Image: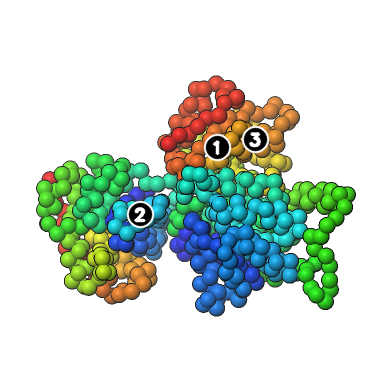
Amino acid sequence: MKQLMTGNEAAALAAKMAKPQVVAAYPITPQTSIAEKLASYVARGELASRYIKVESETSALAACMGGSLAGARVFTATSSQGLALMHELLHWASGARLPVIIVDVNRSMAAPWSLGVDHNDSLSQRDTGCIQIYCETAQEALDNVLIAFKLAEKVLLPTMVCLDGFYLSHYSEPVDIPEQADVDRFLPRRKAKYRMDPNDPFTFGGGVSPQVLFGLRKRIQSDMDSALDCFRQICTQFFRYFKRRYRAVESFEIKGKDIALVTNGTLSGTVRAFVEQNGKEKGVGLVKMRLFRPFPKGEFKKAIKGLKKLVVIDRNLSPGSGGIFSQEIRSAIYGIEAALPIVSVIGGLGGVDVSIEDLDRLVDRIREGGDLQDETIWMEA
Amino acid sequence: MIEIKLSGRGGQGAVLASQILGSAFFKIGNWVQSFPSFGAERRGAPVSAFLRVDTKEITLRYGVKHPEWLVLFDPGLVKNKMVMDGVRSDTSIIVNSTEPAGKGRFGLEQRLFIVDATSIAEGLNLRTTSFSIVNTAMVGAFAKASGLIDLDSVSAAIGELVPVKKEENIAAAKEAYGKVKEVSL
């Protein structure tokens, strides 16, 4: 059944349907309505969960980690500075192999204060060992949260579902609501193999020798690698239950095109509309990145076969380097036969609109501009 | 695709109005996308909300640049640059005003409709301590002026989304539907 809801409402509903035993969140624009919605589910008795009120995002994640350690399914949501405050514990959560689910409603990092979206908050967590999934629509927000729980609890790593602030968190649109019975079958109660239990004691997160630490780090890398296969399998299962198919990398109308615009998050929606309207005439298609960590190298290479140029639009900036997705993509495709030229574009920082007209101008500039490989194109407002 | 902008002052209910219209269009089988203007909303400051309606999925993710319809909850907003940004000669405008002729059409050259939503709301006792709640009347006026949506769907959406005084709010939409008038050039 389809209902109108915002991306935040969809994410909160998915969290409710996943039946976490522990929820802890601290309000921050534009995430607040997720925390509010979950609090009201618990208050009305629609969600049997411990809703732990906390005084900061550090505490929110700490409370979830405690719950996760005790074997519970746990959920938190945050944004921007709040996620930055979680940073220290995110390393801990992945090192301790705790499948915490975090919804990050992307918002630009201060200073200066801004409420608009870019992805620097979540991408700053790149090296923490946290899985990252990006959403284009409110439907994907709902679906990705369900997928995230299953994936995190399978590979035992914290998993972040990223929603663009405002363009997704506050846009209200039709969302197909799954049946609770199907969600229960897709996502049964978590069974933790190791958990903190006074009757069956283990040591968690204690001091280790350098050799043990080295081994555990290597293990996170191999489990991240296997998370790609897990993601694929879980998406197949998801399709069986809910009839919506998802992939780590998705291409749209790239057949017969020489250029692909590569994006993530809600920008993919605008690019999709642009490709539908002008794609044939301009010779462009869309490649959309759903997963950022683990980085789906193999699927990306498959998705771009036959293309002559990639235009990577980053809604983020690593000062001193450039767009983060374009770095990752350069690294992923380095050394493959007839390496593709990549044009790096920075757009939409701080929630600046990127419209169809902006994309039209961008493609024209790239068609006329020759190589452009050594420069960054700025889509300024 | 139809793009609609609804502008009022913080507290007048422009965001809820876009949700009501969104729900009404959705009920009759359309894809809709409704959203508020982004920023820190404050009571009394201009606030805009937007609605896109189409027969197929809408994948655009940016603000409405050039609305086909502009619904103004306060005649003073005609002079507000932010509110009037992107309004073109082919934009149709509906203004809440106590003056039927709208003071020389407020200097507007676009297709113009006027409705006295404030008096309608006051008559039905739809008010807070600081504002008349004109949003449901403006939604009713939009339905009539645009002819894009029927009053029954609008009334049903009001019944579902307005938290208090449902009947009075539906009555406000109906009254405004009957009273909105086009002002000739």
Rendered location of residue B99, percent (x, y): 12, 57
Mark 2: give few (<14), some (14-19) or many (20+) Cα within 10 Å: many
Which residue is depicted at the point 67% across and 33% down?
A: A330
Q: Is residue A23 above or below residue B48?
A: below
Mark 1: give few (<14), some (14-19) or many (20+) Cα within 10 Å: many
Q: Which residue is mark 1?
A: A313
Residue A179: name its quadrant.
bottom right
Q: Chain of mark 3?
A: A
What whole-number distance in Å separates the C-alpha atoms at marks 1 and 2? 28 Å
Q: Which residue is mark 3?
A: A327
Rendered location of residue A32, percent (x, y): 50, 61
Q: Which amino acid, mark 2?
A: Ala
Mark 1 or 3: in front is: 3
Image quarter (top left, top right, bottom left or bottom right) of the C terminus of chain A: top left
Q: Which residue is mark 2?
A: B49
Q: Which amino acid, mark 3?
A: Gln
Rendered location of residue A231, percent (x, y): 70, 54
